[in-house]
Image (cartoon, helix red, strand yellow):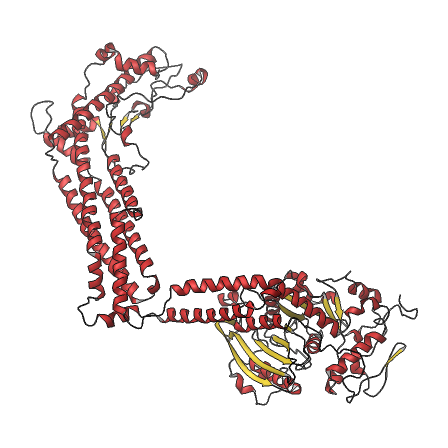
Amino acid sequence: MADSRQPSAISHLPSSGETAADEDIQMGNYHIHPLRKDTPPNVDEGYDTGRAETGRGIKELVAAINGLEQLGVEASDLPLPKIVVVGDQSAGKSSVVEAISEIKVPRNSGTCTRAPLQINLAADDEPRAKWTCTVSLHKKYDFCNAEPSNTSAQKQSPFYPWIEKDFPSDFLFKIVHRKEELEEVLLRAQVATLNPGSHPGNYLSCTINGTDDTSQLQVEFSPNVVRLDISGPGLPNLAFYDLPGIINQSADTGKPYLVKLVRSLVKEYVRSENALVLLACSMEGDIATSSASSIVRKMGAEHRCIVSGVLTKPDRLPIGDSVDIWKSVLSGDKFRLGHEYYVTRQPAQPDLEEGITHTQARLLEREFFEVVEPWSKTFSQFKSRFGTLNLQTALSRKLTQQIRANLPNINSQVARKLAQIEHELADLPDPPAANSLQIVLEALNRFSNIVERHIEGAHPYNDFRHQWRALAQEFVQNVIQMRPTLIVRTPSDLTPQPVTFGSTTTPTKRESQETISILSDSEGELPTPSRKRSVPAKKRKLDATPNEASPQKFTTPQHRHTTKPPVGLARTFRLEGVRDTLEKVCTSDIPGEVDPKAVDHLRLESLANWDKAMNDFIKKTEMALGRILHAILDDVLSPWKSTALYKETSKIVDDYLSLSVGEQRTHAQRALRLEQFKPMTMNDKSIEENEKKELTFFEAARYAARANSYLNQQEAMLGKRPDLNEVRTRKIQTDQTLRKELGVDPFQREVGVMAKVRGYYNVASMRFVDHVVQGLQAELFERCRTHLHEELKTGLHVDVEDGSAEGHCTHLLAEDSAREARRIQLKKEKERLLQAQEMLSGLSNMSA
């Protein structure tokens, strides 16, 4: 319970920087005796100053993670565990960093940290071990020396005008052996980082005024890291990043982008799933307005806060602040982030200027929390979270847990990335130092052997043959679908009738011209009207129109296929048009005589569009053959894809294919010209059979069309609805009386001529198709199988009898600079990952 003397509000407590060095400090009813410069380190017996125990047992774990970071294996898919210290400007963050790391960082009245500071602490308890700090500059970003604008580069880089480098670099700045020298060296390292246009070594000895004097700085903030690798007796095994404090406005009003750069820098570090966040908040300000806290919440990193935060400057609490408010903060009822809040008290600037040591600062901090209210009694339940030592222990414990929990995933990710690199390197072998001619000849032999197998089409190399047979069948079907069609119904078959079913209108022009189209032969089947689905009688009366009959198409079952016929390429004839042609072309004076020239004219007219189907087939064949040749080439020459060998071989294959296909196109065009020159065939039997078959089919179709028109007229005159059911079909096929009533077909001659036209088309089309297909099969494919190999040898100048062949092959296998750079990069990454695996191999038994 709190002491009865406790005030309801906090009175003003003087900070360590406001007291005289030689006077007692009065805080409430208690006194703190300030430590003199000559106070021995172990002034209080039995008090552990926080040097020895913190981080014991995790030295190897932290060292391994630090080693992985230095190797540069960290990436978006391999985030390494790390502690990230964030806070607002002047929140006391740098003081906390000093207390944890036992060093002094550069101080000034403004921003202390202007670049990320990576601090790696490692205990070295060897008998002769000494404190050592290696200061390095890790350059991951280049400065583009241009103020941000709305450019694509700005969108691509979160730290614009800083652009990420392809290959990060490290510069060893200095190795320090005396703690008191580190502050100045660190200041110089920051200045060097803030002048990216100058060599870092220039700042080891030149005169500098500090980072407050921006006139000496090329930039005010940098995303590049200053790394401190510190080892020594009794140090904690920890590693963390100290980031620049969040600023809300830039001192230079002409550079507002600096605010965004610092915020983006903090977000980039906080967003990593394995980043443990240590948030510093000053107790002399309003915790609710912390910009750093807001960023942590917006990035969804609350659960990764090692502690809810570290509260700094407890000796500067504003006068009148309610104890209850801070008690609710410490208990986690307000502003909670992740875990509990810790509180530390660090020396003020006057103390630092007088040279207070780390041990003295820790003793004074402990005495403060034990003596001063409200920390000593009112907040005594939280005393396990007061002081730097307790904070160090929490950091060590949380980092240990995070590393151990992530070791299995880190191991698997390193192995996965190593396998990816090995796979890519397999396609980027070192260029041969000797036997270049043999390598090229072996590659050409392998290519030719695989091509030969695919052309022959034996299993399992039959994919191309299957594809090409499908293309050939499509060509056949396209030509079949271009057979001439005949509209067998004529306007003279329909006699317009007066009123039907109460209608006073006459049939429309469309109705009077409805026809049945003959699209292909029926192979002996008689054409019949198409059957419609049954419709209720009542609806039939409403929908029916006299003389209405849908166009009917007759197809050959054997020729049904899934390929759509070429739109508009088939020649469609009308009986009236055929009659006109016979009259115009005929040279005979005998009425009704059929002139053979007129028939040949119609035959040639039906062949007009073969070139379209032919060219489409040849083009698709060329594309299919080109795809398989290049697929084989890509496989055989995959290790040399960026070399002249691949480029020249690919060009020779393309040129050879284009030339060979061009020859076949010429042969096919000649065959087409022969077909379209004059109808002829020596196959008397085939032409006779085809004409007879087509005549039977056309006559049956023509009779059915005339009979249906006649019966429709008869039923309409009687007021009946036209009957198109099976009864009518049987009547048309068997009723001899109906046949006598219809009499002789006035277009009998024209129907016979169309049978000749289509009969010849059947014979000529298959002859033409066979000629084109056989030419590709016997010449194009065979040449690729037998001659392409020699064409490649000649084109590449690798004839073994040629004395310059070896040198030319060496040139063909020489790689370009981009390929070489990529292989070098991959080898470096592989080396780093192998080192990482070696580091991790000894830690497998330490995982969670």
In the picture provided, is 690 more to the left or to the right than 705?
Answer: left
Q: Is residue 457 above or below residue 813?
A: above
- Residue occupying the point 30% across, 63% down: 646
Q: Position of residue 681 (x, y in %)?
A: 11, 34
Q: Quadrant of the C terminus?
A: bottom right
Q: How many marks?
A: 0
Residue 282 location (% of width, % of height) = 74, 72
Image coordinates for residue 462, horizontal then vertical, percent:
29, 46
Q: Residue sitting at 24 percent across and 72 percent down?
A: 807
Q: Is residue 225 left or right of residue 732?
A: right
Front one among 507 and 442 = 442
Q: Main secondary structure of the magenta part?
A: loop
- Residue at image coords 30%, 38%: 567
**The N terminus: image quadrant:** bottom right
Range shown magenta: 44-48
Give whichever of 668, 740 is nearer the camera: 668
State the image quarter where residue 42 is shown: bottom right
